[in-house]
Image (cartoon, rainbow, N blue to C red):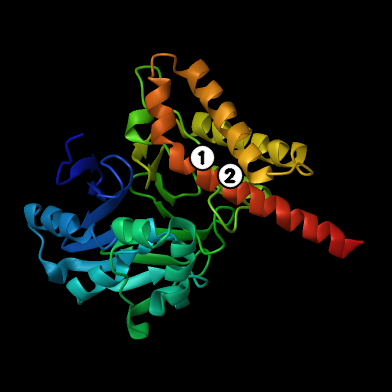
Amino acid sequence: MKVNKHVNLGNGIYSVDARYICPGNACCYLMIEGDQVAIIETGTAYTAEGIHEALISLGFGIESVRYIVPTHVHLDHAGGAGVLMQRYPNAQLAIHPRGARHMINPDKLIEGSKAVYGEEKFTQFYGKIIPVSADRVLIIEDGEKLYLENRVLEFRHTPGHAEHHFCIWDQASQGWFSGDTFGISYAAMASDLDRFIIPTTSPVQFDPDKLLASIDLLMSYGPKRFFLTHYSVVEEPRKKADLLREQIECYREIAYSLCHEPDREQKILLAVKKMTLTRISSAQPSLDLKAVEKLLELDFILNAQGINIWASKQEQKKKSDV
């Protein structure tokens, strides 16, 4: 797949491929209002050059970047923050209160990611993680607003995927920058019929009740579109929200049905994979199911880990309540 420097999505919003794992996997967004720019999602250390190329081609210099905004601190969303903050000296890093300390001192973030991916994959995926100076970090509370020129960006805390997650409502485009809260829908998951979407429940803070509540919150704004990190803009949000809700409930049922099984995580993985591929095959029979299965391989593994960790927490909670 060819990677464009940027794609114009209208309303002063441009997507930039994050160069993460493969083209079409993750993207960042440039929001342009007058002479100011906000970068929403940072990708990894390897993403910075693509963002720079896009800004230059659009006629903006380093002094134009006002805000750098990761939706949460998972490294495919925030791993490039330190590099970008070094490159754009006028920018502030807008971050969830629970994520700020990890941007200032990313040691635990790095350690946790290496535990999931291993040293080699970590370096391949994320590169070098650079700390952000505390005096340039702007902690954003739930419901707080920032202004890009006269453009209003409203931030809502949206736990369920991660406790350190917020989404950004842009009134001008009637759209949400949803990070991982509103699921993932890679470019290759689209057909002439529709574009399939799945929840992402990667470890370690997945909570189905909180995620369902966050989706309801986002939908209460009556959005016309969602700007996904994985991947780009999707329309028909009500249909997508229903699809996400159904799958989240299926994840919960899978966890409960396998709660006493040995090798539970592996069995959750197989069940999640089967359920998802069956739904994709039914909804979009023209897609190459083997190619989609390969595309989603890592997501299936991470989702199974997240569901299994949630199930373990539920068991511990029951024991402590006895």
Contact (Cβ within 8 Å) of mark 2 with mark 1: yes
The image quadrant that residue 103 belongs to is bottom left
Q: Is residue 285 above or below residue 172?
A: above
Residue placed under numbered mark 1 in the picture: 300
Residue 238 location in percent, x, y? Answer: 52, 32
Q: Which sits in the foreground, 21 or 132?
A: 21
Q: Is residue 1 above or below residue 317?
A: above
Residue placed under numbered mark 2 in the picture: 304
Residue 232 location in percent, x, y? Answer: 32, 41
Q: Which sits in the foreground, 140 or 150?
A: 140
Separation (CA) of disc 2 from disc 1: 6 Å
Circle 1: residue type = Phe
> Is 183 on the left or on the right of 263, as rendered?
left
Which quarter shows the C terminus? bottom right
Residue in view at x 18 percent, y 72 percent = 87
Under circle 2, the secondary element is helix
The image quadrant that residue 233 belongs to is top left
Which quarter shows the N terminus? top left
Under circle 1, the secondary element is helix
Residue 132 location in percent, x, y? Answer: 33, 78
Residue in view at x 28 percent, y 43 percent = 22
> Is 83 on the left or on the right of 273, as rendered?
left
Residue 243 location in percent, x, y? Answer: 55, 31
> Is 185 on the left or on the right of 30, as rendered?
right
The image quadrant that residue 278 belongs to is top right
Residue 151 seen: no
Alpha-carbon neighbours of circle 1 within 10 Å: few (<14), some, or many (≥20)?
many
